[in-house]
Image (spheres, rainbow, N blue to C red):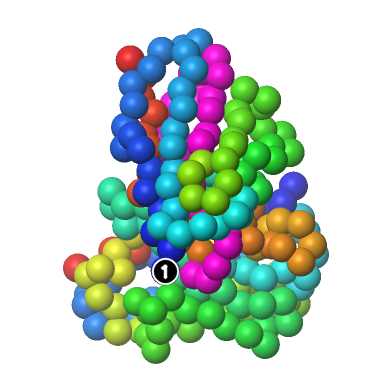
Amino acid sequence: EVQLVESGGGLVKPGGFLRLSCAASGFTFSDYTMNWIRQAPGKGPEWVASISSGGHYFYYAEAVEGRFSITRDDTRKSVSLVMNSLRVEDTGVYHCARDWGDVGARNYFDPWGRGTQVIVS
Amino acid sequence: DIEMTQSPSSVSASVGDRVTITCRASQGVSRWIAWYQMKPGKAPRLLIYGASNLQRGVPSRFSGSGSGTDFTLTINSLQPEDFATYYCQQGNSFPRTFGQGTKLEIK
């Protein structure tokens, strides 16, 4: 079964730090771009960051650029999100998600993990 | 960024009803649209991709249509497990963006 499981969320004060992790299983992890997507209370999902297969390319949403860092470890089949200088508006559920779609057009997200809650207060 | 606008924001329906949700993109996205189902505490689920392609394992009562800027998700013969929040997402350009959601509630 293809599965993603996040961990590392919690309550942190503004300006603080958190490291989220996502463990993958059931697929060839190294072949896929991986993503973090967050959902603030009462709002739609927001893409946060992506890391390419091989780990050579990184992309960030403007709202987190310079504060968050995405990394991956293909031997451990895991992807992490290091979050610095956290703000109240970073509060939400953070989901790990795999890029998915036809070869050369993986423009969607599947599967997702259940998410880990981050509260900045 | 491409803005995705869904309507309605919420809808009430009964088991067995047919429901249609609309998503409008602020600029053309061809057919690069996905629909997701989300329930609290559960992993979001991809239902439809490429505007009208049913993801493996998704019941055939779900269908999608549209191209350009206007898209619809239709659920025929609603089942109890379908009551959830639905989101559209554009995959045409970076950053990939989502709608604000449509909450489907039991009447």
* In the image: residue B56, left or right of residue B18: right
Locate residue A55, reporting x and y percent.
Answer: 67, 83
Residue at image location 68% in from the left, 58% down from the top:
A100
Q: From the viewer's perspective, is A14 left or right of B14?
A: left
**B102 within the magenta span:** no
Q: Which residues are magenta?
A: B72-95
Badge 1: how crowded within 10 Å, few (<14), some, or many (20+)? few
Q: Quadrant of residue B101?
A: top left
Q: Going by the image, does A66 lie left or right of A51? A: left
Whether residue A12 appears in this view of the structure is yes
Task: Name the quadrant containing residue A92.
Answer: bottom left
The residue under label 1 is B1
Residue placed most toward the observer, B8 or B102:
B8
- Indicate the position of residue B26 as horizontal and vertical percent values: 41, 57
Up the image or down, A45 lies above or below A31; here it is above
Expressed as whole percent of the image width and height from the top left, the position of residue A30 reads 76, 73
In percent of the image, x 61 and y 44: which residue is there?
Answer: B51
